Structure formats: C-alpha cells, structure tokens
Amino acid sequence: MPGRDGRPDPELLLRRCEAEEKHARRGRLKVFLGYASGVGKSFTMFDEGRRRRQRGQDVVVGALQNGKTQESDSLTAALEVIPMQVRNGKSCVDVDAILRRCPASCMIDGLASDNPEGCHNRYRWQDVEVLLDAGISVIGTINLQYIAEYREQVREITGKQWSETVPLFFIQSADEIEIVDAPADEALRHAGEAQIRREHQLKALRELALLAAADVVDRQLESYLECAGIPFQWGTQERILVCITPRSDASEMIASGERNARRFHAELFVVYVKQPGLVPEDQARLERNLDIARDAGAQVANLPAGDPVDAILLFAEQHGITQVFIGHTQRTGWWNELRGSPVDRLIRRAESFDVQVFPH
Amino acid sequence: MKGRLRVYLGYAAGVGKTYQMLVDAHHMQQEARDVVIGYFEPHGRVDTIAQTAGLETVPCRVIEYRGTTFEEMDTDAILRRAPQVCVVDEFAHTNVPGSAREKRWQDVMVLIDSGIDVLTTLNIQHLESLNDHVFQFTGVHVRETIPDWVVKQASEVVMVDLTPGALMNRLRRGVVYAPEKAQRALQSFFREPALAALREMALRQTAHQLDIPEPLAGPEAAGHAGPRNDSGGSRHERLLLHITADPATAALIRRGRRVADYLQADCIAVAIERSENLAAEEASRLKQHLEFARNLHIETRLLEGEDAADALVNFATANKVTQIFVARPARTPWTAAFGRSLVQRVVRGARTMRVTIVADRKKRVDG
C-alpha cells in the first residue's frame, strides 16, 4: 500500500525484493481450474504440455488420473510419464523420482489428493511445494469443489462434500491460473450417467468457479497497481461502502447494501465516524446497526473523528470503493447552508465512485 | 423455433476464441449436425486456419466501397443453404457501408430468427456497458461496441481464458500478429495491468451471464413490505436516468444500464426541455444521448418544464421510481454553494427516493 503521499513504503519494497529473489529460484506454478469433471482441464493441460515439448521444453507427467477420455490418452502417449507409486492400493506422486529426473516442468493431473500412509507428505499439494522449491515448475489441474474454502458453497449447491481438498492460499500462490470453461451441456456430454447432475447445479458451480478465478485475477491486478503506486480504484470488482451515523435508522441502507453486494458479487463495507459523547440510546442503536451489518457479511470499521467527508474519501481511496451509500437529512442549519452539508461536499469531491443518497 | 446463440468471450486478440469455436464446430459435425462457416477471419494464424479444414464455408459477399473491395458475410446465401449450425467470427464487427445491415450482430440475429444455431466470438472490450472501464485501463475508447442486451440473447457464453503471461509470449513468438504490429501491441494495449483488468471483466461478465434471476417477490419482500406496500413488489427497483447535453451523460447511461441489469430493475431515461431553445450543438448532443439510451433498450421520454429538478422529481414520483440517476455536477466555484445545484435540489426534493450521483470516470490508470 502506498503511503498517504503516494510513495511506496521502503520496508515494503525491501520485503518485496526479498520475495522476488526467492521467487526467481522457485519453480512456477500454473493451475487449470474447472467447475466439473469433463470440462476438459486435463486435455487442455496435456495439450499445453505437447506444445511446450514441441518448443523444446523438458516436460514430464508426474500424475495421471484414471478413466480419462481417449483424447487425453493419445496426448499423454506422446509425453514422458514418471510412473506413480502405489501404496496401500492408492497411487501417489513419486516425488523422489521426479527430483532425480529434474525436468523443467512437471504436470500433475489432480492437485487435490490425500497421500497414503508412508509418503513424505500428507497431501499432494505439499508434494508440489517440494517440487517448486527444487526449482521445478508445476502445471496442475483442480476442480472448484476441491478447494477447501469453497467446499461449503459447493455443498449448498450440490448437497455433496468432498473430503480431499487443497487450501485456497495454495491456489492463490499460483503464478498463473487459467479457467477451463465450457457450457454445462459439454460437461454432461463427457460425464458418466451416474455423474449427471441437474443443469442448474452445474450452472451455479460454473458461476462460482468464474468468480473464484476473477478474485485471483483481482488480487494480481491489485498488486500490479500497488507496485506502480497507482491508487486501486475503478477496478472491475464492485466495492460498496455504507456510511452510517448513530442517530439514523440505518437498517434500510444496510439491507440495500447487502442486496447490491449480492447482485454485483461485491465486497461490502459498513463504516461510522466516531463521535464523542454519544448518549446511551444512540450508542445502543449504533451497536444494533453494526450487528446487522456483520450479519449481512459486511466488514465493519470506524473512521477517525474529524471531518467525516475527508475520512470517507480516504477510506474509499484505500479500499477501491465504487459505490458509497449515505443518508441525507432534510434538516438544514445555517452552517450547512453556508458550507454545504457533508453530503453536498462528498458529492462535489467524489470523482471515482458513485454516491447513492438515501432520504431520512 | 429460434436458433441458439453461443458466444466465445475473450479478453484480447490471440487468447484462442476462434480456435476453440472451430474445435467445438468439429465436435458438432462429428455428432452429425450440419455445420457451415459463415464468416472466418484468418489473421494469418496457422493453427486456427488448420481448424477450418473439413468444414464447409459459405463464400462471402464482395462489396465495393470507394474503390476498394470488402468481403462481408453473405447472410442471404447462408439462409438459402439453411445449415443447422453456423460459425460467425467477430460478433462486434461493423459492416462496410452498402451492406444490408450496419452490424454483424444484426446479421446474426437474422440467422437466429430463422432457426439456425450460431457460434460467434467477442472480446470483452466491445461490450457497451464496460466502455468507460476499458478506457481507464487501456486509454482506448473502443468505438465498435455491442449493446449488452444483444449478448444477453446468448443461451451460452463461454469464457476462453489464457493467462496474460502466456498471451504476451504468443505475441512475442509472432503467433498473434506480424512482428511489427506485435511490438506496437506490446507497448500499448498488451500491458499486464490492462490485460489483467480486461480478463477480470471477462470472467465477471461470463459469471453474470450465468446468474440465476432472483424471484422478485420472494418471502423477504413479503416480510419487508409491511402495511405500506402489500403488492409484494417492494424490492423491485425502477431507475430513472436524467439525460442532458452534458458529455458526462454517456457514462451515466452506461452505468445506469449496467446497474439495472445487475439489479434486474426497470430503467427509464428522461430529458427535460425548457421552452427557451438550446444551442444547435447542445440540442444535437441531447438527441444523440437519447438515441444512445434507446439503443441500449432504455425507454426514453422528453418532458417539458422550466425547472429540471421539479420536473424530474415529479415524474419520478408519478412513475414509482426508486432511484434517480444524475451526473456529478462539474466543479463549481465556491459561491455556487449559495445557489443550489440541480443535484442538491433533486436530493432535497426526493423525499422517498434514493438519488445516485454517478462519477464521470474520466481518470486513467497509467500502468
């Protein structure tokens, strides 16, 4: 985050340099993300492997999945495969064999797998970390339902829960993530009859996978802009800021903010400006409203005392806000007439976000 | 029965939209469907051209314009050929003057209406409602745009993805453009932050296209409605856009349209005419803005009134509007605080409605 004067923090730059150095030695991770089996992740990955080989890159296959389509089989036939180990009837990646072979890149079809007993690591994604640390680049495939943080949402859609998962931070650590998208009927065409799910389930999963990929891309965009010292505003992710005061009935504004956040797949923030000497009744109302906000999934913050317009503008800039919701009172005093009410002043200075004014 | 429309959506040239479309066309042919290519733009890309082998192509129509010949899709010939599936590259293309229709998407609609399924390609920067966002990240005002409602007609939108790094490699290897053009592209449009932003827009747009509409009068609506509103429609939004000759109006219309789409809201646009005549230039801009709104499927009205704020609020009240959209006022001198601006007067007048002041989004991100 750049400082208030717009210059990047030197501490941060140092840490970034160190991270970049470490990064230069490490292998690169590329992830193909899909929303269901049959959309063509494995095919896309192996096709890329074939093209890389044609360009003279040293590429091997480190993990294969059973029951792949003929198309994938014919692709892997032309690639060097390092056989998987079988322990207790379960296959796992032969990490030592890959390290000895030391290719430039290794393809892992299916990143989410619990290793059988006797392996170095408990999970396959930890095997991948070992390969990356050894300077080997890894290309892998995964379906949305195998990302731990999305498991609950997937269960809500499908009623099923997958036990073998990969943590989200591992996916977010990928240098590149690519979504393999296909209409739901394509996924149904390739899937066995037992796997055929209702179309709207697949649609919902597909939407979730696209949004998950968009979030990863958004983080990358944020870091590009941050490196260049550009304020992170007017990105493509909507971010809604609801400004409440202790004396207002904020429940309508918060409900409206929640609805917009849901429809836009936006982030929701609810803030209030600290005021000294609140009467107990106002304090209680404020607490109630903040509870409602938290229940609505909002991130709640209090802004420092002082000019509320300055505080809101600064918060909006730091958080890349695209829509500000604010209440407007019909009361006008002589001071407001002279200087313009806080709402008027906010509107005048709001260059990069929309202001939605609620009547009170 | 109408044909089905499938759009292959990408975030830049060279991500592989046309290639993916042709691969799928082959699959359909293998499933014994009657597939033809109605229009294909080779761009000299070897792998993509190879994918057209084995698919029948309906020859283009040659049109002469100002001494040069152009090739456009021959919609009539395709209708006579009557295939089950037709491949049409570059959905946002503008036909050369003298063609039967101005835009290729209009040709595609003709094919769809006659029951032909169409596969087509589109880059995200051509979507009308994202025009201002695209400018911010690329510095390019894309002129060849396609209204959102046209893309909404698609039964499927497929995201064709490629990471910006891989795309830039393709460009450097000369897969996408000839070397000289590739160099220029890498220096302007094909910079990593711009590509990341466009890619995020494409991902979100594809997700939005899959959004399952919310029931309008769900149990929540009944709970919130109370005695004031027992029709069950309390959550249904109606947006009113205020159209003026101010150039910021174009961004206001795009933003209003986008918000209406996301909120599944009705959207009306009004301009208020005073009895004193506008300068000719302003009048023509106002007309352009009204036409632009209609092109985006927004109903427009022309009202008469001496006071714009009063006319706006009265119309909004009479038409059960829930949100009024106005442009942010241009910076006014300090003393203007004494005389109230239109925005201030609308905010004070709208006692039951919300007022949204739309930012003009003129700033550019230079990364």
Image (spheres, rainbow, N blue to C red):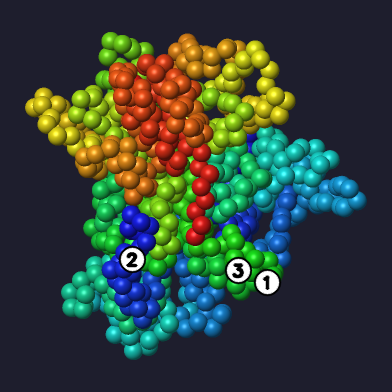
Q: Identify the amino acid type marked 1.
A: Pro
Earlier in the chain: of badge 1 and badge 3, it is 3
Task: Find out whether the residues at labels 2 and 1 contact each other: C-beta distance under 8 Å.
Answer: no
The residue singled out by tag 2 in the image is: A173
Which of A114 and B147 lies nearest the eye of the viewer? B147
Q: Position of residue B1 (x, y in %)?
A: 63, 32
The reply to whether discs 2 and 3 touch (Cβ–Cβ < 8 Å) is no
In this picture, residue A243 sits left or right of residue A73: left
Packing grade of label 2 (10 A; few <14, some 14-19, many >=20) is some
| Amino acid type of the residue tagged 3 in the rendering | Leu
The quarter of the displayed image where residue A296 is located = top left
Q: Is residue A111 visible?
A: no
Residue type pointed to by label 2:
Ser
Q: Secondary structure at mark 3?
A: helix
Q: Is residue A45 above or below residue B203?
A: below
Q: Residue at x 55, y 71 (%)?
A: B169
Q: Secondary structure at mark 1?
A: helix
Badge 3 sits on which subunit? B
Circles 1 and 3: CB atoms closer than 8 Å: no
Quick one: label 3, few (<14), some, or many (20+) residues within 10 Å?
many
**What residue is disc 3 on?**
B171
Q: How far is the residue under mark 2 from the one under mark 3?
A: 25 Å
x, y percentage for residue A164? 25, 61
Q: Chain of mark 2?
A: A
Residue B293, quarter of picture: top right
